[in-house]
Amino acid sequence: MDDPNADTEWNDILRAKGILPPKDEQTKEEIEDLYVEAVNARRREEESLENKTLDELDELEDELEDERIILEYRKKRLAELEQQEAKNKFGGVTQISKPDFVKEVTEASKECYVVVHLFKDYIPACKLMNQHLTELAKQFKSTKFLKIVSDQCIPNYPDRNVPTLLVYGEGDIKANIVGAIAFGGMKMTTSSIRDQLAQYGAVSPEKKDDEKCSASRKRIYQSAATAALSSDEESDEDRGYY
């Protein structure tokens, strides 16, 4: 028996006479649609977690975990930067007067460290101290650096005691460092002052670069002219005088 759906001239005549029903023109399109859907379903299935190997699942899990860690770290760093930026609001040495002391020093020290320089303009050591404190203020913007004329802060304060540094923190005085000798006299440096302030938490201690020190010592020992003096290159530690 001939296939009534076959594309023959005879079947076309029979369809025209109404003997055969019209050919189902949608059959091929439906089959193609079903095929495409099947292919797509297969692709989705292959991409689903259920069809991934253990290695693939482990790799995907690592990627998702790494992304989560990175996002958490980024969020944490942003919060830290914002917090640090809020603290870094100083950066200079500001002169105050006696009526400002409680507000600018005692009260302010509840939120940050405050370093107060008791000075006299005509004393060279005080001028030198102000120069070094200005450098430290630029480095440690979260620490408040102030200066006040000594006998305005403390009536009859002896000039021999200046420069004097007062260190405040947590709403109370932490240190009273009297005299230039505590910082190295007229040979005081930014580093020597920083070392003193770091003992009380006003600034962070200076990091020692072991590699640079080692390289420096090596160059000294390699120099025939200075080899005999190499053992004397180590400087004595600064000693505080209070």
Image (cartoon, rainbow, N blue to C red):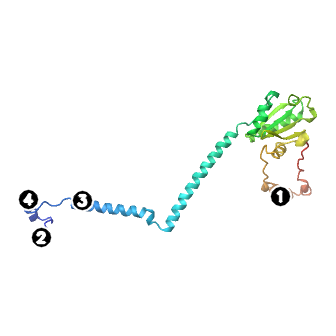
The answer to which of marks 4 and 2 sits earlier in the sequence is: 2
Residue under the point 14% across and 68% down: 3
Give the residue pinned by disc 2. 2
Separation of residues labelled 4 and 2 (CA atoms): 17 Å
* Nearer-the-camera pick, 148 or 188: 148
Give the residue pinned by disc 4. 16
Give the residue pinned by disc 3. 29
Q: Position of residue 19 (x, y in %)?
A: 7, 62
The answer to which of marks 3 and 2 sits earlier in the sequence is: 2
Give the residue pinned by disc 1. 218
Q: Label 2 sits on what residue type?
A: Asp
- Of circles 3 and 1, which is in front? 3
- Tell me the quadrant of the picture where the N terminus can be found: bottom left
Separation of residues labelled 1 and 4 (CA atoms): 108 Å
Residue under the point 23% across and 61% down: 28
Residue 29 falls left or right of residue 210: left
Residue under the point 80% across and 31% down: 101
